[in-house]
Amino acid sequence: VRLNIREIADLAGVSVATVSRCLNQPEKVAPKTLSKIRSIMEQKDYSPNPSAQSLSTGHTKTVACVVPTLKNEYFNQLAEGCQSALAAQGYRMLIYTMQDDVSFWEKLDQRHFDGMIVSGVGIPGGISGKLEKFTVPFVVIDHPEELGERQDISTVYVQDEAGIGMALTHFYEKGNRRFGILTGPASDTSSLAKRRIRAVEEFFRRHTDCSFTMEPADYTDLSLTEKACGQLLSGTSHPTAIFAFNDMIAAGALRCLLKRGISVPKEIELIGFDDIPLSSFFTPSLSTIAAPNRKLGEKAVELLFRRLRGDTEPVHLLYGVELLLRESTRT
Amino acid sequence: VRLNIREIADLAGVSVATVSRCLNQPEKVAPKTLSKIRSIMEQKDYSPNPSAQSLSTGHTKTVACVVPTLKNEYFNQLAEGCQSALAAQGYRMLIYTMQDDVSFWEKLDQRHFDGMIVSGVGIPGGISGKLEKFTVPFVVIDHPEELGERQDISTVYVQDEAGIGMALTHFYEKGNRRFGILTGPASDTSSLAKRRIRAVEEFFRRHTDCSFTMEPADYTDLSLTEKACGQLLSGTSHPTAIFAFNDMIAAGALRCLLKRGISVPKEIELIGFDDIPLSSFFTPSLSTIAAPNRKLGEKAVELLFRRLRGDTEPVHLLYGVELLLRESTRT
DNA sequence: CTGTTAGCGCGTTCAT
DNA sequence: ATGAACGCGCTAACAG
């Protein structure tokens, strides 16, 4: 029921080339024929077949968004930022989750899209191991340090180290000396996870009057997170302040603490990371390191478009973070 | 750097037709040539060009997921369910958000996908107004009542009315007689929104000893939600129980109440709808009507695949809901 | 300014 | 069991 370029051409009494030009280089078509063809296209509700267009041009007007999971609000926000930015440019977005599929990258066929946005994908051996096969431009939402040999690609990232420093320093200045750190899942080998751990270690190297315990936590499974927090409490360090690597984990910790009748922030203070939308709804509302999650996605798209337009200069956008003091920390 | 079917054929000393058969109807190829071609494909890491395949077959192995927004956890969970189900079948997922783009449906080109999953898309005039142009199969995650003339399509939905009845009845049995209802945004004309409102009205038609106030609330903007809840409190009904149409709104209400020093559930009880993952993390944890959000997405995909396989019998999957009593209601 | 034509890569009759 | 040839719908040289 949908006609093709040939039929439009016949209807307008011109050749397919003219119709095609009408779409791609209207300035090269006589105003008169142009308007005539256009009215016919309008009337017949014509639009070029995307598959044919892709086959012919090699472009798909589609971008892939690759995240480890959609079960963490952080990645949802990233994806949301990408999607809206892409839609605004008339691009479609394919969404892929890696989950625990180890052969993910091998199965990914880049001919489906013009470019991709990749985030937080703990790649063993670094990005260079799996992403070097890709010739389509892509932007990584993560620290540039894991780029390896792919120094040519752009990144968008936040000051993790600084954020962690801010949180721990705040705790320290409030008099805390015993800390609990809830890291991401032990299986998370992303550069993001490793970098945050390093930042923690670095902090305590400079604050030898403190003790701390690190405990891996999962944000997918509530019971695991609570258990991890329990470990922290039953250990020898008896923390008075807990820092969680992301807000999902902080949520679990909060629940664990309150269940045990531990007052937050009175007895134990808590700070998370990411500032997901609902963290301000917790009670006590969660103090957290805020990053511009949505914006990261939007900017990544922006950088990707630069590439698509031919600008191959790699750009690294670093965003600052902010310590948002809400109710889970003492004033 | 990637070879095509022609080159593979030459390498194997056969024609392109044989290589193609090798992929699509291997049983029609001599075992010997089959294995030979396959090893070459393996070695050269060959896989057919998706665009060419689509152009030739008319299929894309891609499904569209259309939701109003990705800013509500509910839709994220839906999308997540769809995505994982699709990925398991080797399908890709395009994600579209309608936001407030009125011309969304007109711009949507169905040639990009083999089918679509549509959810909660308040379509003025019903689904039939905008979706009838689509010839690709699609499944609606919503009540069948809005299907209009498209009685041929499958749906997946939950018992909204029953859920609302459960919540309000629970409130009633606990002795509450003055109710506050926080509905979705006034602009939400989806069948879901309307249906929930009808269910509320229906309940109070049968419980004339109650008073209630309905107030539209937005889950995108916290301040609006809090203001809506404030309206409820400052009105004449002085509710002792508040029911929110979704958990995002309930979160805002919770915050509003606690800010004003109103104890939940002691002074005012609160029940939400959806059971988004973080609702159990609120404090008090949110009592809510739980729906199998992820599963709705998965099932929708399942029904869609039936269509793609040729089974045109419309199926309507109705899922039950459950009143999850947590801490925001009295025991 | 417009038309002809050759691909783009693959699926698929129809012969052989 | 295999190959030759056409069609899918469009873009881009090239010619006029």
Image: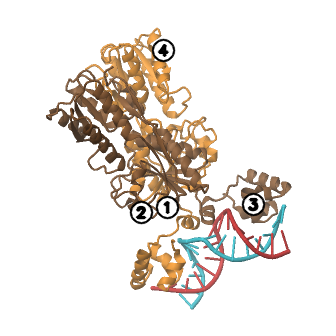
Chain colours: A brown, B orange, C cyan, D red
Q: Earlier in the sequence, mark 1 or mark 3?
A: 3
Which residue matches tag 2? A107
User: Quadrant of residue B170 in the image?
Assistant: top left
The percent coordinates of residue B150 (x first, y second) are 56, 45
How far is the residue under mark 1 from the one under mark 2?
A: 9 Å
Are tags 1 and 4 found on a single chain?
Answer: no
Q: Of helix, strand and loop, which one carries label 1?
A: helix
How far is the residue under mark 2 from the one under mark 3?
A: 36 Å
Which residue matches tag 1? A110
How far is the residue under mark 2 from the one under mark 4?
A: 54 Å
Quadrant of the image containing the C terminus of chain A = top left
User: Quadrant of residue A284 in the image?
Assistant: top left
Query: Is mark 1 in CB contact (under 8 Å) with mark 2?
Result: no
How far is the residue under mark 3 from the one under mark 4?
A: 58 Å
Q: Name the disc covering residue B171, or none.
A: none
Q: Of helix, strand and loop, which one carries label 4?
A: helix
Measured along the vertical axis of the image, is residue A128 above or below residue A140? Answer: below
Q: Residues within 10 Å of mark 3 (few under 14, many from 20)?
A: some
Q: Amino acid at mark 3?
A: Arg
| Chain of the residue displaying label 3 | A
Quadrant of the image containing the N terminus of chain A = bottom right
Q: Say which of B257 and D9 sits in front.
A: B257
Measured along the vertical axis of the image, is residue A182 above or below residue B216? Answer: below
| Chain of the residue displaying label 4 | B
Q: Residues within 10 Å of mark 2 (few under 14, many from 20)?
A: few
Query: Is mark 3 in CB contact (under 8 Å) with mark 4?
Result: no
Q: Amino acid at mark 1?
A: Gln
